């Protein structure tokens, strides 16, 4: 599996998990939104980290 497909699978899985959590959460709207914002920030950090790692791998291959 190439890096692009791997990243897409990761992001798709994260989105599906987030949506499932929203439907199954017995919490208030404000708490759910706060949790969703935290999850989105975590996902953003993980995606940036993964992209940085992949770019470093690509650079090392090209050298």
Image (cartoon, rainbow, N blue to C red):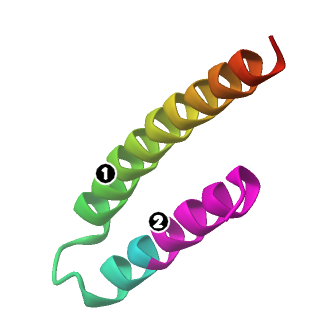
Q: Quadrant of the C terminus?
A: top right
**Residue furthest bottom as drawn:** 24
Q: Quick check: is 2 in the magenta stretch?
A: yes
Residue extent of the magenta highlight: 1-16
**Gap in Å between the C-alphas at discs 1 and 2?**
17 Å
Count of residue discs? 2
Residue carrying label 1: 34
Element class at badge 1: helix
Residue drawn at the location 72% of the way across and 57% of the way down? 2
Answer above or below: position of 6 versus 43: below
Q: Quadrant of the N terminus?
A: bottom right
Residue drawn at the location 36% of the way across and 51% of the way down? 39
Q: Nearer the viewer, residue 6 or 41?
A: 6
Residue drawn at the location 17% of the way across and 75% of the way down? 27
Q: Nearer the viewer, mark 1 or mark 2?
A: 2
Provide residue 31's location: percent of width, then percent of height: 23, 59
How packed is label 1: few (under 14 Cα within 10 Å), some, or many (20 or more)?
few
């Amino acid at each position: 599996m190439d890096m692009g497909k791997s990243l897409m699978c990761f992001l798709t899985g994260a989105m599906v998990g987030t949506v499932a959590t929203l439907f199954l959460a017995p919490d208030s709207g404000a708490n759910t939104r706060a949790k969703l914002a935290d999850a989105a920030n975590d996902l953003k950090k993980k995606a940036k980290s993964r992209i940085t790692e992949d770019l470093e791998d690509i650079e090392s291959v090209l050298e």
